[in-house]
Image (cartoon, rainbow, N blue to C red):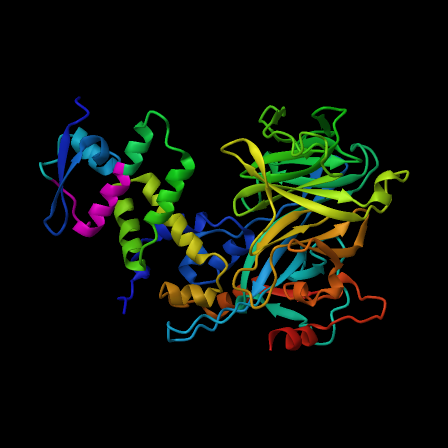
């Protein structure tokens, strides 16, 4: 048996260095919840309201909640399968102190009000492992001048929680694909990139802003706000799909190419029309060779393509939970949540796929009850899927 | 100064290690004592035993070599090597952090601190206490404050 290590003998300046390596709000908060001396080493993450040309930037966080594993004493026994649930929350300012939290559909901005009788009113997160998956930013419009059209997606740099108001840069996609940026002190948003180019998505990756255009060319924004091409187009021969999404998984950058169904492609497209997806192709950027590799099997990973953020979750070790799939909402129809199974390329309504719902919480009210009004309560789903 | 100059390091438990000076001076502590002329020969390294000193030397050698290589060793390969390097038991990791701190080797200190940070991430406070044998020493008032900070009251 290993001799126990006296970690408490580690000098506090080293614990301070370790604490400073934590890069999410959740982790910093929980570091401060262990003991008095750790609490004094790291200040609480300061939240600040970020106003940006004509509105302000709000934040929602996607997390994975897991009860701590009940590992058997005997290390010969295999560990019991993990359970976990994906949720999205936004913390609300509360004058009384003590966080009030709004739950959201992880893929959209829709708040979840129906929770079912067994849903706790107050959750003590210290009883759970909480892993922050992604911080999603959204733009709340206030006045009518100052920004060039309907906001589709924004990101901020540097990433929270180390963000400082005066240094924050906001990059956004507006309208049907115009790229703009704003930084602290500016009056208006600035246009960026080729005005004839339609930009489909953007992401903060390794501390920089990357964007993808309709051809699947990924570029990054350099410190002088120039767009620098970073990859070849996803489909050189023009056979690509209709909308590209950028997502990070396992440290690599992926483009997911969405193909609309035949009707959506050729009918008169108005902004705001619902466009249903017929299929997806997934590509990983091979940075060493500067090319895209098509990925047909995601293994233990599930990709989530939401309206305001795209993220990936590894379901390795989760009891019966399925990876190798893509969860998404239809364009302009955030209530239509679908799941693409990468094995057989089938697309199903999420509410019709119990295997895919285990990771969603509160399950699965946010996928909307189907026509029969059948909505599963958390206890119901838990007893069905986890017994 | 000839780059093939060697120095001898003496661990706390009396073992000698002969290394290139360019490797030894990855440690700012050793570099300073050589430059000040106050280092003896062999250079004693108190507080670091032979097992850990051997590992530290291995790390420094690898990093010096990869910086010198004509085709720069792919950063990713070095990152992968580093990741393997820190796959050690807790006692070794603990000793490595302390050695990196004492010897003032910034990159090793960063690597080992990041490794501990990764061990911390996501776990409950209670699990963290167990992993690192830390006592919960909050006063009742602090305990209440901590609990409120970690609570989610749903709308």
* Viewer-closest of A15 and A235: A235
From this viewpoint, is residue B57 visible? Answer: yes
Residue drawn where x is 82% and y is 33% of the image: A145
Q: How many marks?
A: 0
Indicate whether residue B59 is drawn in magenta: yes
x, y percentage for residue A378? 69, 72
Q: Residue at x 68, y 64 (%)?
A: A357
Magenta span: B43-61
The single residue placed furthest to the top in the displayed view is B1
Q: Is residue A363 left or right of residue B85?
A: right
Q: Quadrant of residue A74?
A: bottom left
- Considering the whole magenta stretch, tell me its main secondary structure: helix
Locate the C terminus of chain A and report the quarter of the image it occupies.
Answer: bottom right
Could you tell me residue B60's position as x and y percent?
27, 38
In the image, residue A294 lies in the stretch drawn in magenta:
no
Rendered location of residue A49, percent (x, y): 67, 45
The quarter holding residue A349 reads bottom right
Q: Is residue B18 above or below residue A75?
A: above
Residue positioned most to the right:
A268
Residue A224 image position (x, y, % from top left): 60, 23
Q: Is residue A328 above or below residue A103?
A: above
Residue B144 visible, this orientation: no
The quarter in which the N terminus of chain A is drawn is: bottom left
Relative to B77, B121 lies left or right? right
The answer to which of A47 and B126 lies nearer the viewer is: B126
Q: Nearer the viewer, residue A326 or B11?
A: A326
């Amino acid at each position: 048996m290993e001799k126990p290590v006296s970690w408490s003998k580690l000098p506090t300046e080293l614990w301070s260095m370790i604490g400073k390596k934590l890069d999410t709000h959740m982790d910093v908060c929980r570091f401060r919840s262990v003991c008095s001396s750790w609490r004094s080493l790291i200040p609480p993450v300061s939240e600040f309201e970020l106003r940006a040309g004509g509105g302000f930037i709000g934040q929602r966080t996607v997390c994975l909640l897991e009860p701590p594993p009940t590992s058997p004493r005997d290390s010969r026994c295999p560990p019991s399968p993990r359970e976990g649930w994906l949720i999205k929350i936004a913390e609300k300012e509360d004058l009384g102190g003590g966080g009030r939290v709004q739950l959201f559909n992880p893929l959209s901005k829709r708040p979840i009000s129906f929770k079912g009788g067994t849903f706790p009113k107050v959750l003590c997160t210290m009883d759970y492992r909480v892993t922050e998956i992604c911080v999603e930013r959204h733009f709340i419009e206030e006045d009518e001048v100052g920004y060039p059209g309907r906001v589709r997606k924004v990101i901020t740099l540097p990433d929270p929680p180390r963000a400082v108001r005066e240094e924050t840069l906001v990059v956004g996609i507006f309208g049907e694909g115009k790229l703009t940026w704003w930084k602290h002190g500016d009056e208006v948003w600035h246009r960026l990139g080729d005005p004839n180019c339609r930009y489909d998505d953007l992401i903060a990756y390794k501390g920089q802003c990357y964007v993808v255009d309709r051809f699947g060319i990924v570029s990054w924004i350099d410190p002088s706000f120039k767009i620098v091409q970073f990859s070849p187009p996803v489909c050189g021969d023009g056979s690509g799909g209709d909308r590209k999404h950028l997502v990070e998984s396992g440290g690599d950058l992926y483009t997911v190419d969405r193909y609309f169904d035949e009707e959506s492609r050729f009918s008169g497209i108005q902004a705001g029309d619902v466009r249903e997806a017929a299929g997806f192709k997934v590509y990983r950027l091979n940075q060493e060779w500067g090319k895209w590799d098509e990925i047909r099997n995601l293994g233990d990973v599930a990709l989530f393509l939401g309206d305001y953020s795209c993220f990936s979750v590894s379901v390795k070790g989760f009891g019966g939970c399925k990876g190798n799939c893509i969860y998404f909402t239809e364009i302009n129809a955030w209530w239509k949540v679908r799941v693409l199974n990468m094995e057989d390329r089938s697309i199903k309504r999420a509410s019709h796929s119990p295997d895919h719902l285990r990771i969603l919480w509160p399950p699965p009210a946010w996928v909307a009850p189907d026509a029969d009004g059948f909505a599963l309560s958390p206890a119901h789903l838990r007893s069905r899927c986890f017994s | 100064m000839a780059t093939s100059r060697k120095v001898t390091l003496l661990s706390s438990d009396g073992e000698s290690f002969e290394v290139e000076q360019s490797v030894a001076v990855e440690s700012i502590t050793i570099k300073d004592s050589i430059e000040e002329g106050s280092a003896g020969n062999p250079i004693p390294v108190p507080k670091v035993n032979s097992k850990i000193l051997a590992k530290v030397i291995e790390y420094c050698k690898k990093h010096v070599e990869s910086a010198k290589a004509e085709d720069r060793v792919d950063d990713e390969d070095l990152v992968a090597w580093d990741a393997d390097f820190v796959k050690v038991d807790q006692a070794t990791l603990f000793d490595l952090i302390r050695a990196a701190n004492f010897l003032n080797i910034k990159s090793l200190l960063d690597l080992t601190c990041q490794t501990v940070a990764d061990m911390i991430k996501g776990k409950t406070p209670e699990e963290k206490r167990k992993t690192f044998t830390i006592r919960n020493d909050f006063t009742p008032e602090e305990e209440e404050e901590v609990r409120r900070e970690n609570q989610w009251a749903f709308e």
